[in-house]
Amino acid sequence: MPVAPRSPPCPRPIGILGGTFDPIHYGHLRPALELLEALDLVEVRFVPCRIPAHRGAPQITAEQRLALVRLATAGQAGFVVDDRELCRDGPSYMVDTLASLREDFSGIPLCLIVGADAFRELHTWHRWRELSRFAHIVVMRRPGPSKPFVPVLEEFIAPRRADPVALRRQLAGGVLFQPVTQLDISATDIRALLARGQSPRFLLPETVLAHIHERALYRSLPTPAAVTL
Ligand code: ATP
């Protein structure tokens, strides 16, 4: 029996980690590095949003959050900061970001990286089914068994389940659950520590913390009025 020719592998994929990064912390950085290495990504692009579509307004400006992301990622080979969402008006929809990245990187697999908690809400994202037209989805998950997702997500995942090799065989469309070291760190907790005058040291890079102190950021929790869009 002749063996069917295998389609040639695509180039190494690009990872895309979107977020509010209010502020960026080791819970973002360590898993991103692990994915860079485990999936042999060309790079991980950190994409801070301008106006988050699915939550209240961030506590500091997009430019300030971008500056913190630049500080956090400086010097790490393969970490790239992408400010395209700051250049767009309106809510920062990931589907628009992926469409724009697809135009820039036409022949390269794209991997949208999301935390397991964010993935559970994927079906509430703007035009969420279209995400997989432009990119694979890589879910950073805890090692061990995971709870089922809502039925609409389970149906979405079933035909798309991929392994790391599959991410190199097509440009988009797979869903991969990749175990990473889980660090129970959240930007919410860091903001709360800072507002109480306590130290978030060792939860985020020293350079980021120094910048936060220099600019007197996160000195108080936002009032309800400040968190509406
Ligand atoms: P907040 O506490 O303000 O909601 P956050 O710490 O969850 O913020 P985001 O900027 O909202 O940070 O997260 C960006 C992406 O990183 C999301 O996909 C989110 O699921 C993921 N993420 C955030 N914290 C962690 C963590 N500790 N481990 C793994 N993934 C994380």
Image (cartoon, grey):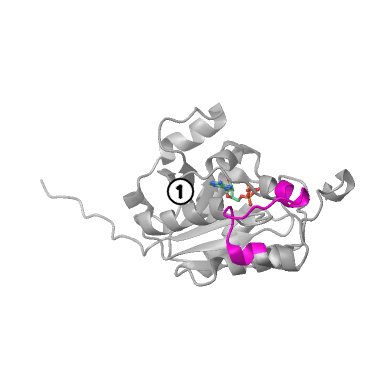
Q: Which residues are magenta?
A: 191-209
At horizontal 57% and vertical 43% (from top left) the residue drawn is 129
Q: Is residue 126 left or right of residue 218?
A: left
Query: For mark 1, does the 10 Å Cα neighbourhood hold few (<14), some (14 to 19), or many (20 or more) residues?
Result: many
Q: Quarter of the image for the N terminus: give it.
A: top left
Q: Could you tell me residue 131's position as x and y percent?
A: 56, 49
Secondary element under disc 1, as helix, strand or loop, is loop
Amino acid marked by disc 1: Gly
Check disc 1 and report the residue beneath it.
173
Tell me the quarter of the picture where residue 66 sits: bottom right
At horizontal 47% and vertical 37% (from top left) the residue drawn is 157
Q: Is residue 200 magenta?
A: yes
Residue toward you, 146 or 148: 146
Residue 70 in view here = yes
Tell me the quarter of the picture where residue 175 sits: top left
Residue toward you, 57 or 9: 57
Instruction: Determine whether the beta carbon of the residue marked 1 sits less than 8 angstroms from the nearest atom of ligand 1.
Output: no
Residue toward you, 163 or 180: 180
Q: Is residue 166 magenta?
A: no
